[in-house]
Image (spheres, grey):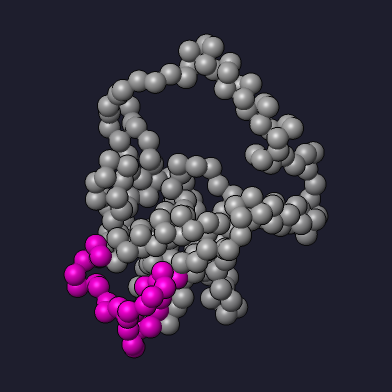
Amino acid sequence: LGISSINWIAENLKIINKSSQLVSLEPNVGQIMLSKAISEQRKRCHSTGGSVGIVLLKPRQVGWSTWCEAEGFCEINLRPNRVALCVSADNDSTNLIFNMTKIFQAELPVNMRRATQASNRREIIYESPWRSRFLTQTAGKDVLDFADEMSGKFKDLAKALNISNDDFIRTTDEKRHLPAVYKLWEKFKEKGDIYKKKYQGFYCPGCESFKT
């Protein structure tokens, strides 16, 4: 890109945090790691003329989805005639992502906002001569069906890489995973480790966690 996407995003993009505050998108450690991985993908793809594809098998509350949208938005703003496409498993997720992208666009510094073209789809299109766009779509499948498809791809990946594993357990496994989760949850409750309480503290929007 000729400029660090991490710096560009931190300097120019804003999000709504869990406290409903408009704040700068300051990357956390996990997001920085993801950004470096995406950067390596870009280098390989730009040298071969391919496109960057990212499939996330992710933990929750790390902010990786947010960062992927930010990386795509950064790309279409720094390069003309580019398309950033985000495909979600369900319509609600697609709407959330598009709303986040609209905030990115609306809160850009005034001198950086490009003229946009009207569209009846969930996308942002920059007018000619820039012509880059950010498009969000829904996979058009039931969430579990989509997860089944992705699970199969990860199994095939092990074969392609000629690696093996002792087991392959999915979080939707009702015979092995779910009973173990329920049992662990009940043990935590019995020991008093899980409880409801009101508290306040220093909150980091980037890490999506409280700091002590």
Residue 190 to residue 153: above or below: above
Q: Which segment did they paint magenta? A: 106-135
In magenta segment, residue 190: no
Q: Quadrant of the N terminus?
A: bottom left
Confirm whether residue 67 shows in the render: no
Residue 186 to residue 58: above or below: above
Residue 210 to residue 161: above or below: above
Residue 163 to residue 114: above or below: above
The number of discs equals 0
The single residue placed furthest to the bottom in the displayed view is 129
Q: Horizontal and vertical percent for residue 20?
A: 26, 45
Q: Nearer the viewer, residue 66 or 136?
A: 136
The single residue placed furthest to the top in the displayed view is 191
Left or right of 200 on screen, residue 150? right
Q: Residue at horizontal 40%, vertical 56%?
A: 96
Confirm whether residue 121 shows in the render: yes
Left or right of 22 on screen, residue 170? right
Q: Picture quarter containing residue 123?
A: bottom left
Q: Nearer the viewer, residue 131 or 20?
A: 20
Q: Horizontal and vertical percent for residue 187?
A: 58, 16
Q: Horizontal and vertical percent for residue 28?
A: 39, 45
Q: Nearer the viewer, residue 99 or 164?
A: 99
In magenta segment, residue 120: yes
